[in-house]
Amino acid sequence: MGARDFRLIYVSVSLTFPPLPRFRQGAIKRFAAEIDNEHPFESVENRSDAGGVLETEGRRWLRIDRDGLEFQERSVEEGWDVVSRNAVDLVERARKSFQIPFYLVSEIIVRALSPVEPEASKLLQERALGVNPEQYQLLGKDVRGGSVTVVGTHEDPEFNWSVEIAPYLSDETNVWIEVESHPLGLGTDVDEGGDEDDLLSEGLHGTYKFLNENVMTFIANVLD
């Protein structure tokens, strides 16, 4: 398994910001119409004056509330550059449309699959988990294996992170990888003339680079 041998399957971004005034009637639908040429969604759900959800089933999901926003790319068919650029643009369009004065990037999640040999459960059990068969039997006779979770911090950019490596149970020729990052200090006050695009982009690309360079090298080193 090469250190860079993986396939993205999911990306999400969560933001928080000071509570907005209650949404005016039709605000979410008007926003969906504004972005439709660049970011089409199949359905729009209004949630009264509290916000709404835009969705393309099985692929893309955007929730906008009075105090937060979450974007999910649930089926990553395009490359990382396209996905991250879309996320940054959607957040910027929402910020301007709903006059969000300031936000923090509270969480970024990136999930991927990476091929392994032999099956993932056995490989993780033998190479990564210091648990013997007798100890597993304390949980029952049909224990198939386990996952590894590691937490830490990253600098330049700064973020706290959690990495989970687990068997991909629907196809155990792959391990399932999730990188969850919590950026430190990302966000800006619009009145100060900050560049939100650069700040969010930094968080996204820092997380992806950590997956690509650090996490995949760790997996190759531990499991090979």
Image (spheres, rainbow, N blue to C red):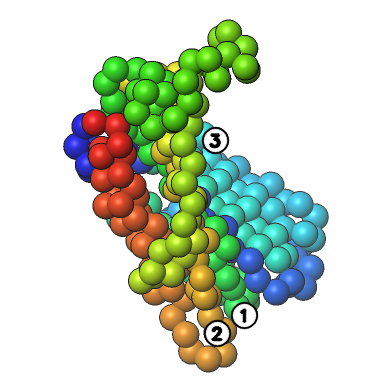
Give the residue at mark 3: 57
Q: Name the residue at the top extreme.
A: 141
Q: Residues within 10 Å of mark 1 (few under 14, many from 20)?
A: some
Nearer-the-camera pick, 111 or 75: 111
Sort mark 2 into few (<14), some (14-19) or many (20+) by Cα contacts within 10 Å. Answer: some
Give the x, y percent position of residue 190.
Answer: 55, 84
Q: Are marks 1 and 2 in contact (CB under 8 Å)?
A: yes
Mark 3 nearby-residue class (10 Å; few <14, some 14–19, many ≥20)? few
Q: Earlier in the sequence, mark 1 or mark 3?
A: 3
Cα distance between the residues tagged 3 and 2: 33 Å
Kindly indicate the quadrant of the structure image that contains residue 200: bottom left
The residue under label 2 is which amino acid type?
Val
Q: Which residue is mark 1?
A: 101
- The numbered mark at residue 213 is none
Count of numbered labels shown in the rendering: 3
Quarter of the rendering containing residue 142: top right
Residue 117 spot, x, y in % from top left: 27, 21
Earlier residue among tags 1 and 2: 1
- Secondary structure type for disc 3: loop
Reading the image, the residue beneath label 2 is: 190
Above or below: residue 37 compared with residue 60? below
The amino acid marked with disc number 3 is: Glu
Residue 154 found in image quarter: bottom left
Q: Residue at x 30, y 37 (%)?
A: 222
Who is closer to the viewer here, 77 or 176? 176
Measured in 3D between alpha carbons, the distance from the residue under mark 1 to the one under mark 2, in whole angstroms, is 6 Å
Q: Is residue 13 left or right of residue 154?
A: right
Judged left or right of residue 70, residue 59 is left
Query: Could one spot residue 90 in this view of the protein?
Result: no
